[in-house]
């Protein structure tokens, strides 16, 4: 693989004019000033072992606290016995996105590609609206039933 054409394209895009050179160097400097301290805080100065938040004395990220509160970060104050609902919703979302995007390896296996190619946009919008309204109605019905 010849890398020279890629370097040439990068040079043309980032260093074409004196103003482009200045902008590129300023942004590179700002990124350096932001990323290096962030990496140091996340990895170098971080505390990875311990049992309580009091073990975090280094000034870096406290991964002990993150490990202890991971369930709360992921589920909020949702009851632990009901977290399967959140996980099921996440799995359904992942499956739905996979079906909508379609896989390149299985080109005729997904209905989404055929729908996107053949149906106008207002039909897609109507289908999405129907899904949202049905989901909202189901939530309201469940709330009223309780």
Image: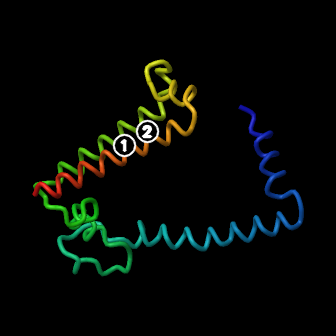
Element class at badge 1: helix
In this view, the residue in front, 111 or 27, is 111
Q: Kindly identify which numbered label has been placed on residue 127.
A: 2
119 vs 28, left or right, is left
Q: Secondary structure at mark 2?
A: helix
Asked if residue 96 is positioned above or below residue 53 in the image, the reply reads above
The tally of labels here is: 2
At 60% from the left edge and 74% from the top edge, which residue is drawn?
33
Rendered-image quadrant of the C terminus: bottom left
Q: Quadrant of residue 54?
A: bottom left
Side (left or right) of 107 relative to 144: right
Residue on which disc 1 sits: 131
Residue lying farthest to the right in this orientation = 17
What residue is shown at x 57% (from left), y 72% (from top)?
Answer: 34
At 44% from the left edge and 25% from the top edge, which residue is drawn? 111
Residue 39 lies, in percent from the top left, at: 48, 67
Residue 42 image offset from top left, x and y in percent: 42, 68
Which of the pair 4/131 is nearer the observer?
131
In which quadrant of the rendered image does the N terminus lie?
A: top right
The quadrant where residue 97 appears: top left
58 sits left or right of 84 in the view: right
Question: Which residue occupies the foreground of this view, 76 or 40?
Answer: 76
Query: What colour scheme was applied to this rendering of the protein?
Result: rainbow
Residue 98 sits above or below residue 76 on the image: above
Residue occupying the point 17% across, 70% down:
51
Up the image or down, 111 lies above or below 2; here it is above
Is label 1 in contact with label 2 (beta carbons under 8 Å)?
yes
Give the class, few, some or many, for how many residues have Cα within 10 Å of label 1's Cα (few <14, many ≥20): few
Is 18 in front, or is 125? 125
Give residue 48's position: percent from left, percent from top: 29, 66
Image coordinates of residue 56 in percent, x first then y, are 28, 77
Question: For the residues marked 1 and 2, what is the alpha-carbon distance in whole angstroms?
Answer: 6 Å
């Amino acid at each position: 693989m010849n890398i020279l054409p890629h370097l040439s394209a990068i040079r043309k895009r980032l260093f074409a004019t004196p103003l482009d050179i200045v902008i590129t160097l300023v942004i590179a400097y700002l990124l350096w000033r932001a990323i290096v301290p962030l990496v140091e805080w996340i990895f170098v100065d971080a505390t990875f072992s311990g049992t309580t938040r009091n073990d975090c004395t280094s000034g870096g990220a406290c991964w002990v606290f993150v490990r202890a509160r991971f369930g709360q970060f992921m589920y909020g104050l949702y009851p632990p016995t009901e977290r399967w609902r959140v996980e099921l919703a996440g799995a359904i979302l992942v499956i739905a996105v996979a079906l909508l995007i379609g896989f390149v390896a299985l080109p005729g296996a997904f209905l989404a590609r055929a729908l996107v190619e053949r149906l106008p946009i207002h039909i897609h919008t109507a289908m999405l609206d129907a899904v949202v309204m049905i989901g909202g109605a189901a939530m309201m019905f469940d709330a009223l039933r309780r």
